[in-house]
Each structure stands twice: as structure tokens, then as C-alpha cells.
Amino acid sequence: MSEVNTATRTVGLSPARRLARVRMASFGAVTMLIIEFILGMIYNLYGTAPTASKSIGLFSSPVLALHVIMSILLLVAAVMLLVRAIGARHRLTIWMSAVGLAAIIAAGFAGLGFTRNGAVGASLGMSLAFAVSLACYVVIILAASSPPPSTT
């Protein structure tokens, strides 16, 4: 029964309210990305880096474990943001959330590659994918803040 109530509440929202929800979800994603970046930098500075002959486990240190957990939560948030953008029917936010989600997935695969062999290219891939996803979500915040262009 709660699923029906939730669906009914979302359907009944005005387009402006849906866009406001997309903006707030994007703000949450930006916050999560910054926390993820900080955790990655802490591990990069103080953690044990993998080598070509020795990989590391995803939960080999508390900071890395938090980094992995945050990445999973970030992936879920990015999927939900895309769903909200589609529900708002705002073309730019749909595209930006799709690209942001793709960048988060790319960062995840780069992170998995980094834990296997410590390749600097994988570390660079994580940071570039972070920058792309952060830029996408900031664009959503800005685009969802402005009123839609008038057609008259």
C-alpha cells in the first residue's frame, strides 16, 4: 500500500516541484562525491598502494572500506537521480544525470582495476570520472534552479 501512496504523491507533483526534487538530489550527489573524493585522497596518502605483483582487497583498510561503501551508495543515488530526472521530463537534467551515472560506473571499474595492480592509469581514470560526474551534477543544480524558457 505504501508503494501506491508514494507513486501517487510523485505523479501529483507539479513540474516545478519535480525539478526542485531533482536539484536537491543532485546536491546530495555532489556532497557524496566530495566525501568519496576525500576518502580516496586519505587512502592515497596513508594507505598501502597495490603493486603489479600484489593486489589489495576492497575492504583491506577502514578508509578503503568506507570508500567502497560510499561508492555503492553513490551508484544507487545516481540511479535514483536519473529516475527523478526522467520523471521531471527535463531534457538537460536527464542527459546530465545519465552521463553522471556513466561516469560513476566508469570510476568504479577504474577503482577495481586500481586495486588489482595499482596502475596509475586506473587512478587517473577514477579522478577524471569523478570530475565528469561532479560537473554533470553541478550543471543539474544550475539548470534546475532557473525557470524553464518560455515558448511564447
Image (spheres, rainbow, N blue to C red):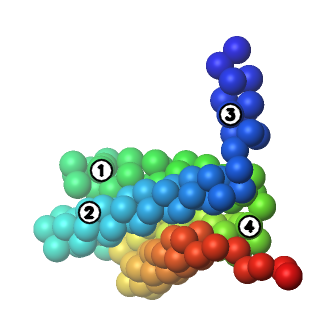
Q: Name the residue under label 4.
A: 90
| Amino acid type at image mark 1 | Leu
| Amino acid type at image mark 3 | Arg
Q: In which quarter of the image is residue 49?
A: bottom left
Dot 4 and dot 3 residues touching (CB under 8 Å): no
Dot 1 and dot 2 residues touching (CB under 8 Å): yes
Q: In this rendering, does residue 10 appear at all?
A: yes
Q: Name the residue under label 1.
A: 66
Q: Earlier in the sequence, mark 1 or mark 3?
A: 3
Per the rendering, the mark at residue 9 is: 3
**Residue at the image position 65 percent from the left and 19 percent from the top:** 2
From mark 1 to mark 4, how far is it between C-alphas? 33 Å
Where disc 2 sits, the SS reads helix
Dot 1 and dot 3 residues touching (CB under 8 Å): no
From mark 2 to mark 3, how far is it between C-alphas? 36 Å
**Residue at the image position 36 percent from the left and 62 percent from the top:** 31
Where disc 3 sits, the SS reads helix
| Amino acid type at image mark 4 | His
Q: If the image is split into quadrants, where does the N terminus sit?
A: top right
Q: Which of marks 2 and 3 is nearer the N terminus?
A: 3
| Amino acid type at image mark 2 | Leu
Q: Mark 2 points at which residue?
A: 39
Q: Earlier in the sequence, mark 4 or mark 2?
A: 2
**Badge 4 local density, few (<14 within 10 Å), some, or many (20+)?**
some
From mark 4 to mark 2, how far is it between C-alphas? 33 Å
Where disc 4 sits, the SS reads loop
Q: Which of marks 4 and 3 is nearer the N terminus?
A: 3
**Residue at the image position 72 percent from the left and 56 percent from the top:** 15
Q: If the image is split into quadrants, where does the C terminus sit?
A: bottom right
Per the rendering, the mark at residue 41 is: none
- In the image, 109 versus 77, the foreground residue is 77
